[in-house]
C-alpha cells in the first residue's frame, strides 16, 4: 500500500489548481464546512488535506503555504495539534468504528483549545461502517463555527448518499504522465523502472513510489517469466504456486496478471503492449497461444479474483494452483 509521505506544507504539484481554489475560498470566507476529496488511490489526496489543514492552523503562513516553523506547525508536524483530529482505520483495511466517530463528535462539540480553526480529517471515508457513517451525520450537518471536516475517498460510490450530500465534492485529478514522471524522477530510480512502476500503478505516483521502494518490479518480472516456464513445462504448477504464495500480496499479483492478459491479446493482433519492460517474454508467451485463450485467461483471472476477494479466509495456494493448471491447459 501507499506509504505515508513525509509531512510537507505543500500539496503535490498536480493538485496546485485545487489548492488555489480552496485557499481563495478560505480567504474570501467562502470555504464549505465539509469537503469530500475524491479520486483514485495513490495520487496525494491525504497530502493535500494535511497541507491544507496545516495552512489553516498556521500562525504565520506566507500567503500560500503554512510556514512549517511556528508553534502551531511544529505541533501539527508532531501529530499533536489540539485543534486537529485525524480519523483513520486502526489497521489498514479495517473499518473506522463508531467509537472513533464518537470521539470525533466530542472533539467537534467541545471548546477548541487554540484560537482559530478546528480541522477534522477522515481517511478513507469509505472505511466507515454503517453505524459510524450514521454517527457522523449530525456533526457533518452542523460542525460548529470555524470547523472544517475533510473526507478523503478513493471510492466515493461506496459512501452513503446522506454523507455525500452534506459535503462539497472536490474531484482530485490524477497527474498527467509527464507530471508523474517528473515527480518520480527526483527519487533516484532509473527511467525504465519509473516507467514500469507507473504502468503497474495505473499512473498513481505515490503507489508507483511504493512499488519502486519494495522492488515489486523485479517480483513481477519473475511472475511473468514463470508464465513462460509453465507454458514450456520447465517448472511444475505446484512449485510456481508455492513461490507466488510467498512472494507478495496475491491481489497484487492478480492485478499484474490482468494487465498482462490484456497485453497478450494485444500482441496477438499486433498492437502495442503496455507492460513494456516484460514485452519480450510476453511476445514469446503469446506466440504459443491462440487469441481466444488470452481472453479465456483474462476471464479465469476475474473468477479467481472474485473468489479471492469474496472469501473470508481463502486458501491462496489452492487458488493459485487452480489458476495455473488452467493456464497450462490453455490452447
Ligand atoms: Zn506555521
Image (cartoon, grey):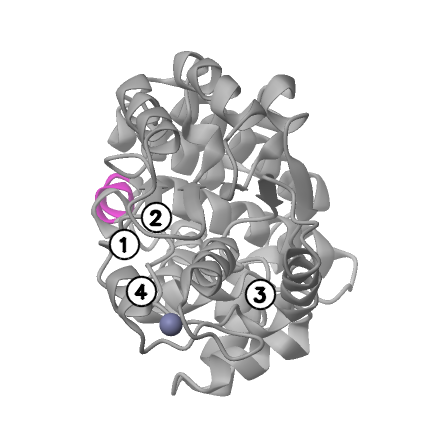
Among numbered discs 1 and 3, the one appearing first in the sequence: 1
* Quadrant placement of the C terminus: top right
Q: Mark 1 near mark 4, Cβ–Cβ under 8 Å? A: yes
- Position of 249 compared to 268: left or right? left
Mark 4 beta carbon near ligand 1 (under 8 Å):
yes
Q: Secondary structure at mark 2?
A: strand
Tag 2 residue: 84
Can residue 152 be seen here?
yes
Q: CA distance from mark 4 to mark 2?
A: 10 Å
Is 233 or 40 nearer to us in this picture? 40
**Which quadrant of the view contains residue 268?**
bottom right
Tag 1 residue: 81
Q: Mark 4 near mark 3, Cβ–Cβ under 8 Å? A: no
Among numbered discs 1 and 4, the one appearing first in the sequence: 4
Q: Residue 275: which disc?
A: 3
Tag 4 residue: 72
Among numbered discs 3 and 2, the one appearing first in the sequence: 2
Residue ID at (24%, 56%): 79
Amino acid at each position: 500500500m501507499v506509504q505515508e509521505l513525509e509531512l510537507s506544507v505543500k500539496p503535490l504539484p498536480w493538485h496546485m489548481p485545487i489548492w488555489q481554489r480552496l485557499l481563495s475560498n478560505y480567504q474570501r470566507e467562502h470555504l464549505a464546512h465539509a469537503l469530500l476529496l475524491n479520486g483514485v488511490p495513490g495520487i496525494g489526496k491525504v497530502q493535500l488535506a494535511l497541507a491544507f489543514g496545516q495552512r489553516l492552523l498556521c500562525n504565520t503562513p506566507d500567503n500560500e503555504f503554512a510556514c512549517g516553523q511556528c508553534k502551531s506547525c511544529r505541533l501539527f508536524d508532531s501529530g499533536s495539534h489540539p485543534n486537529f483530529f485525524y480519523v483513520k482505520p486502526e489497521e489498514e483495511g479495517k473499518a473506522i468504528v463508531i467509537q472513533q466517530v464518537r470521539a470525533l463528535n466530542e472533539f467537534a462539540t467541545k471548546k477548541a483549545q487554540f484560537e482559530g480553526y478546528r480541522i477534522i480529517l477522515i481517511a478513507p471515508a469509505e472505511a466507515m461502517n454503517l453505524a459510524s457513517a450514521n454517527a457522523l451525520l449530525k456533526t457533518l450537518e452542523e460542525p460548529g463555527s470555524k470547523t472544517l471536516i475533510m473526507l478523503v475517498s478513493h471510492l466515493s460510490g461506496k459512501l452513503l448518499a446522506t454523507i455525500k450530500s452534506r459535503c462539497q465534492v472536490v474531484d482530485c485529478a490524477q497527474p498527467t504522465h509527464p507530471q508523474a514522471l517528473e515527480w518520480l524522477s527526483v527519487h533516484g530510480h532509473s527511467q525504465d523502472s519509473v516507467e514500469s512502476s507507473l504502468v503497474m500503478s495505473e499512473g498513481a505516483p505515490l503507489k508507483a513510489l511504493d512499488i519502486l521502494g519494495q522492488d515489486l518490479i523485479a517480483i513481477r518480472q519473475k511472475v511473468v517469466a514463470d508464465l513462460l516456464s509453465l507454458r514450456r513445462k520447465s517448472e511444475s504448477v505446484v512449485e510456481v504456486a508455492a513461490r507466488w504464495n510467498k512472494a507478495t500480496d496475491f491481489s497484487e499479483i492478480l492485478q499484474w496478471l490482468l494487465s498482462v492478459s490484456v497485453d497478450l491479446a494485444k500482441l496477438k493482433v499486433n498492437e502495442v503492449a503496455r507492460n513494456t519492460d516484460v514485452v519480450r517474454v510476453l511476445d514469446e508467451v503469446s506466440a504459443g497461444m491462440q487469441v481466444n485463450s488470452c481472453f479465456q485467461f483474462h476471464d479465469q483471472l476475474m473468477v479467481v479474483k472474485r473468489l479471492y476477494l469474496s472469501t473470508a479466509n481463502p486458501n491462496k495456494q489452492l487458488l493459485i494452483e487452480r489458476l495455473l493448471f488452467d493456464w497450462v491447459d490453455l490452447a
